[in-house]
Image (cartoon, rainbow, N blue to C red):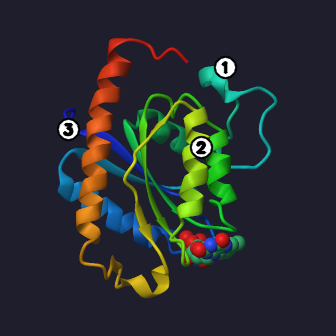
Amino acid sequence: MDNDKHRLVILVGSVREGRFGPVVAQWVAEQAGAHGAFDVDVVDLAAYDVPLTLPAESPKYAGDAYPRPAGMRGLTEALSAADAFVIVTPEYNHSYPASLKAAIDWHFTQWTAKPVAFVSYGGAAGGRHAVLHLENVLTELHAVTVRDGLAFPNYFTAWQDGRPLDPEAAGYAKTLLDQLSWWTAVLRAGREAAPYPS
Ligand SMILES: Cc1cc2nc3c(=O)[nH]c(=O)nc-3n(C[C@H](O)[C@H](O)[C@H](O)COP(=O)(O)O)c2cc1C
């Protein structure tokens, strides 16, 4: 790994059978790799055990002692190591999937003082309701959400052969990644300079 590069986790938020999420995540990973500022790790929630039943205590205070399932370890390690996140999310009933909420709720400090950008897709709204809800939730975890996201309305006609048809999409992705990189550098320096006062 290149220590000068930011460790970026691209999180695939949907775990549904026949899901489209991995297609979007793979394209985002290509854009992030080409951008140059990031070491990219695509983390697929479907690969981990993320139950809905939580332990009695809060992950905010338990630290490494928080009793997570063995099948979640790789996910926790990836989130802990990340300097930045792109969450790839569809829209389910005007919000984001329960799989994503469960993964968020099993963690706390892994998100703190780190930047999160969003790439969404769905029907007419392109997943914007999902992103609005995620911004609200991640603020509670002391994450910093990036203003410019990427939304793909009616993804079923807007994508072909694993790529968006919109010729502007790569440019929008670069803007998102530029902002994410700026925030990553600032927050990484801040975390190294002093503990975040959460
Ligand atoms: C339970 C469920 C609810 C959905 N609700 C919405 C919705 O509110 N708005 C929307 O634009 N699309 C909605 N959709 C369509 C999804 O955005 C679309 O199926 C998308 O492919 C889901 O992402 P995935 O394939 O990665 O699971 C819904 C799909 C499901 C399965």
Residue 61's mark? 1
Secondary element at image label 3: loop
Q: Nearer the viewer, residue 76 or 194?
A: 194
Looking at the rendered image, the disc whose residue lies closer to the viewer, 1 or 2, is: 2
Tell me which residue sits at (32%, 13%) in the image: 193
Image coords of residue 166 (percent x, y):
30, 79
Q: Find disc 2 in the rendering and name its residue.
A: 136
Give the side of residue 113 with respect to residue 190, left or right.
Answer: right
- Ligand 1 resides in the quarter of the picture at bottom right
Looking at the rendered image, the disc whose residue lies closer to the viewer, 2 or 3, is: 2
151 in relation to 65, above or below: below
Asked where in the image residue 137 lies, by quadrant, the reply is top right
Q: Find disc 3 in the rendering and name its residue.
A: 2
Bin the neighbour count of mark 3 within 10 Å (Cα to Cα): few under 14, some 14-19, many 20 and up.
Answer: few
Image coords of residue 92 (percent x, y):
65, 67
Bin the neighbour count of mark 1 within 10 Å (Cα to Cα): few under 14, some 14-19, many 20 and up.
Answer: few
